[in-house]
Amino acid sequence: MSERPAPTRVVVLGGGTAGWMSAAGLAKLLGPLVTVTLVESEDIGIVGVGEATLPHIRGFVERLGIDEAEFMRATHATYKLGIDFRDFGRIGDSYVHPFGTFGEEAAGVPFHHYWLELQRRGMAEDLGHYSLAVSAALASKFRPPTADGSLTSTYGYAYQFDATLFGPFLREHATKNRGVERIEGKVVEVRQDPESGDVTTLVLESGREIAGDLFVDCSGFRSLLLGSTLGERWEDWSPWLPCDRAAALPCAHISEDFAPVTSAIAMPAGWRWRIPLQHRMGNGYVFSSQFISEDEACAVISDAVDGELLAEPRVLRFRAGRRSKSWNRNVIAVGLSSGFLEPLESTSLYLSQMAITYLIELFPVGGQIDARDRDEFNRLVDMEYDRVRDFLILHFHATERDDSEFWNHVRTMQVPDTLAEKMTLWRETGRIEKYSDGLFYDASWIAVYLGQGVWPQRHDPRTRLPAPEQIARALARLREAMIEEVAAMPGHREFLTANVQRLAAAP
Ligand SMILES: Cc1cc2nc3c(=O)[nH]c(=O)nc-3n(C[C@H](O)[C@H](O)[C@H](O)COP(=O)(O)OP(=O)(O)OC[C@H]3O[C@@H](n4cnc5c(N)ncnc54)[C@H](O)[C@@H]3O)c2cc1C
């Protein structure tokens, strides 16, 4: 029988969301193969924004063995069925990008082709009417999906939570239940092996030294290990994603009822978010400093929010891009230290989650790093970033807006070839590029293309085999079934109160 190798000493630098997700995930899923120590400095603090997530986060919370209701109560979370986009294609337009599908394919032809055929004949209702997630979101209703293959299993959900509470919740969990050691202190020196260049030790202001075999850099935008120490190159994507600031501010709810969605409302120099939490509304103006000053953006967002202001706007600065490699030598960057893509599709925590998942799958058990594993990790992380990048750029580029310099810039800019090819395929055939890894599949692309007025020149000719009336009847039946399902769902607030807040009331 082979002996278990000595545990790999993992040192996580940073106690933001990425740091605590990494520490909790590695400790739980690698168990005795690792010891995990996390260093954080309360003086430096965390970014502390990032309220909206994707459905994948549920799997992460579940794999950690955390009870959903307990987690939602602790982080003041609400449910999210998608993102409600306003004014992106044209001022006055709106559409929901749902966590779910539109209709069903029939005779091997995807639903949206039938919808396009009826649309051409003036016989279709709005595309969102054929998505249960959209229909429920617009009615401010919520119920978790089923897994029985029926209509009620055609959507997923995510959470919207208070970002300042998620890290501390994971910290409590990781230190109490998973044996993670937390060390408070500021890292002032990073020692490297003179021969290999591997990081060996972090030295704190107090003089304390923390040695490790593997270092997970979660130091945020500073990227202390991967960027500053190892000098990993930064790939700048700001020519395509020019937003580089956000002015965030919370306000009170104006109504007891709120929809289970994140709102993204286009603005003259970017867009603003509106995220309902249990106790308040999160807001922020994501803007490009090339087109509006910080002071102006703060004034605009303060005027735009609809509830009583609960704080002054807080400005955050960032840039779009990523490090060329997220894993270099024995340093793996997770979170903002590896890259950042603006929060339009709530993808940052997903990117952290995937980096942690890939690291666990390719983990150098016993401490010996295999270059093939490192390369594979970097390939997978790059793929994830590239997919998100193209999808985000689409939201800005696919517009008819010409009412501000910002929109003129993004409408007319040259986009990456990978996106240009996807858009050409769509425009010429109504088809979505197929892939089976990373984020954003057909329904997501269809929602944004059609929601922002990018119409294909043709669609699948097989949609003309059935009589149009027959297709119209099938769609009408689907619509009726959706109306019935939505009518039977509880309100979002009602469901939250019953299933999450009841824990708060428990003795
Ligand atoms: C405007 C904005 C909106 C966002 N919205 C979303 C969203 O809706 N959804 C989403 O998924 N994501 C969103 N994000 C991203 C999300 O906030 C981050 O991915 C997440 O907070 C992870 O941050 P982090 O842990 O990498 O970095 P940070 O929160 O910055 O944490 C860095 C940590 O490193 C520590 N540290 C740094 N240097 C040292 C040192 N020398 N010694 C010791 N400790 C050190 C700090 O103390 C801190 O603990 C948003 C980001 C921004 C800027």
Image (cartoon, helix red, strand yellow):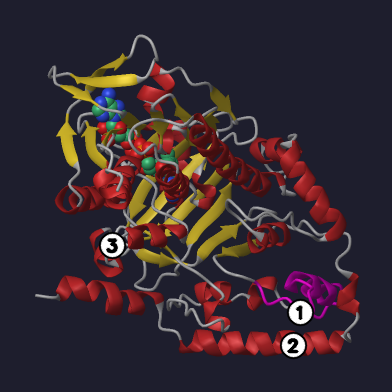
For disc 2, the marked residue is: 474
Q: CA distance from mark 2 to mark 1?
A: 10 Å
Secondary structure category for the residue under label 1? loop
Instruction: State whether residue 104 is above or below residue 81.
Output: below
Element type at marker 3? loop
Residue plotted at (29% across, 48% down):
1
SS of the residue at dot 2?
A: helix
Where 160 falls versus 202 (above or below)? Answer: below
- Tell me the number on the disc at residue 106: 1
Identify the image quadrant of residue 134: bottom right
120 drawn magenta:
yes
Residue 47 seen from this side: no
Q: Residue furthest left?
A: 507
Amino acid type at image mark 2? Ala
Q: Residue 201's mark?
A: none
Give yes or no for residue 424 being in the magenta stretch. no
Task: Rate crowding at label 1 as few (under 14), some (14 to 19) or many (20 or more) other CA atoms within 10 Å.
Answer: few
Residue stretch rendered in magenta on the structure: 102-123
> How far apart are the alpha carbons under marks 1 and 3?
39 Å
Left or right of 500 on screen, residue 230 = right
- Place of residue 355 in the rendered image (x, y in percent of width and height, measured from the top left): 45, 43
Task: Give the image location of residue 75, x and y in percent.
Answer: 27, 58
Q: Mark 3 = which residue? A: 65
Q: Quadrant of residue 402?
A: top right
Q: Nearer the viewer, mark 3 or mark 2?
A: 3
Identify which residue, 359 or 270, lies in the foreground.
359
Q: Do the numbered discs 2 and 1 sit on residues whose CB atoms are within 8 Å?
A: yes
User: Tag 3 or tag 1, which sits nearer the N-term?
Assistant: 3
- Classify residue 71 by image quadrant: bottom left
Q: Nearer the viewer, residue 94 or 436?
A: 436
Q: Earlier in the sequence, mark 2 or mark 1?
A: 1
